[in-house]
Image (cartoon, helix red, strand yellow):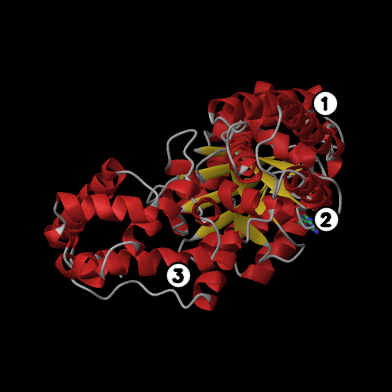
Amino acid sequence: MFETLSQRLRAAVDRLRGRGRISEEDLRSTLREIRVALLEADVNFEVAKGFVQRVQEKALGKAVLESLTPAEQILTVVYEELVEMLGGEARQPVLKSEGNLWFMVGLQGSGKTTTSGKLALFYKSKGRRPLLVAADTQRPAAREQLRILGERIGVPVLEVADGEPPETTRARLRQHLTFDYRDLVIVDTAGRLQVDEALMEELYRLKVALGPSETFLVVDAMTGQEALSVSRAFEERIGVTGLVLTKLDGDARGGAALSARYVTGKPIYFAGVSEKLEGLEPFYPDRLAQRILGMGDLQTLLERAKQAELEAPQKDPKDITLEDLIAQMRQMRKMGSFSEILAMIPGLSRMLPPGFTVDEKQLRRMEAIVLSMTPKERRDPRILNASRRRRIAAGSGTSVQEVNRLIKTFEDTKQLLKTLAKQRGRGFFR
Ligand code: GDP
């Protein structure tokens, strides 16, 4: 799933790659492509609109137009927005030490029963004692399906009777729990092919009777925009605390599912990724966004570092010289431009202030200054008096001020490294 979206988004960003500065028109056309990519993947119209608007605002804020690496900058913004759209931080349902009762709701065929079984297995393997409740009072076949699942995973199943009133179900559940201790009760409720009032009423009454601690809405990612109106209906009528997206292993476009979190305002707790009972994964917005955007970049970075045989200096900070500084800069340059390297470090580009870029020219001038020094000067900048500084400035085609600034920066950095090394131990730098 999400392959088309992935390809289109990457193509939109890649068109900017390897280019210097871009024009406002370039940015606009990239944003247009992103919007089309989202809509073609079936992302909800409003969600896509808001997405592109925020990308535009952030891109302008980050001065993408002035940046020398517009593709990386835009990619970062798109990634951030994608993570945001998927819910930001990963979230898990509340799980107390006991007395957990989870209510599973959703349309028939959404994967509700399968997901109930998957959840029971998932938490059983984490040492919990789940109980499944087959609560469809009208369809014996649905209850039987859960009973079979329960047998397969070794989890008991309490079945309601045909037409059983919610109060009776509550009493029977209480009774069951007095002789069979369970800390997590998962209630697989009735589903219909469409949202209908009678179903909603039945679910609502059962919910009031049982007082669940979490209410999961199971959303079939293959069903497109329909899934969103269904989600809204369940949220309004029953109240939902979190979502499970099922069938993410399918080949549908899936954009609607990606909008579900935004449309309902509820976190996505889990994703169903296969028909098998093991096919349930906690949902990580950042990982999915990385996958969609093809950000295998940390991998690339590590590979390049290996190729460049880059090694952290094994020296004590107080022994670091200007020669080490240059050696490091040269080695790192083999890996690509500094901006490129920074953009490849997951998380780092997000921590840098908006509009941050590395001035490569500045770095080259620094290198020229150091190269104009004698080996003795490089090892011990303290001997650099005024006439030496003038000579170095002339030799490197820079100014005395620049030479002064470099030496000052070097001394400050050394001081900072010393302080940090004291605070965190030297392993930190390795
Ligand atoms: P319910 O009517 O909502 O209880 O839906 P079921 O649990 O019976 O699931 C309907 C169909 O979807 C079944 O054939 C399941 O095997 C299948 N299914 C459920 N979850 C997934 C999933 O994550 N991936 C795939 N490929 N199939 C799933």
Which residue position holds label 2?
250
Image x and y of residue 362, in percent: 43, 47
| Label 3 vs label 2, nearer the camera | 3
Please provide percent x and percent y for residue 297: 59, 60
The answer to whether mark 2 is within 8 Å of ligand 1 is yes
The residue tagged 1 is: 196
Q: Element at badge 1?
A: loop
Residue 209 x %, y %? 56, 31
Viewer-side residue, 393 vs 18: 393
Kind of residue sitting beneath label 2? Gly
How many numbered dots are placed on residues in this image?
3
| Residue under label 3 | 331
> What residue lies at 82% left-to-right and 38% top-to-bottom?
37
Mark in front: 1 vs 2: 2
**C-alpha separation, residue under disc 3 versus residue under disc 2:** 45 Å
Residue beneath the point at 83% across and 53% down: 141
Q: Disc 3 or 2, which lies upstream in sequence?
A: 2
146 or 396, which is in the foreground? 396
Judge from the rendering whether residue 149 lies leftward or rightward of residue 306; answer left or right: right
Say the numbered circle drawn on residue 393: none
- Residue 161, quarter of the rendered image: top right
When asked about the image quadrant of residue 371, the answer is bottom left
Disc 1, ligand 1: is the CB inside 8 Å? no
Image vertical order of residue 221 relative to residue 307, above or below: above
What amino acid type should be assigned to the residue bearing mark 1?
Asp
Q: Whole-percent x and y of residue 390?
A: 25, 49
Tell whether label 2 touches label 3 (CB within 8 Å). no
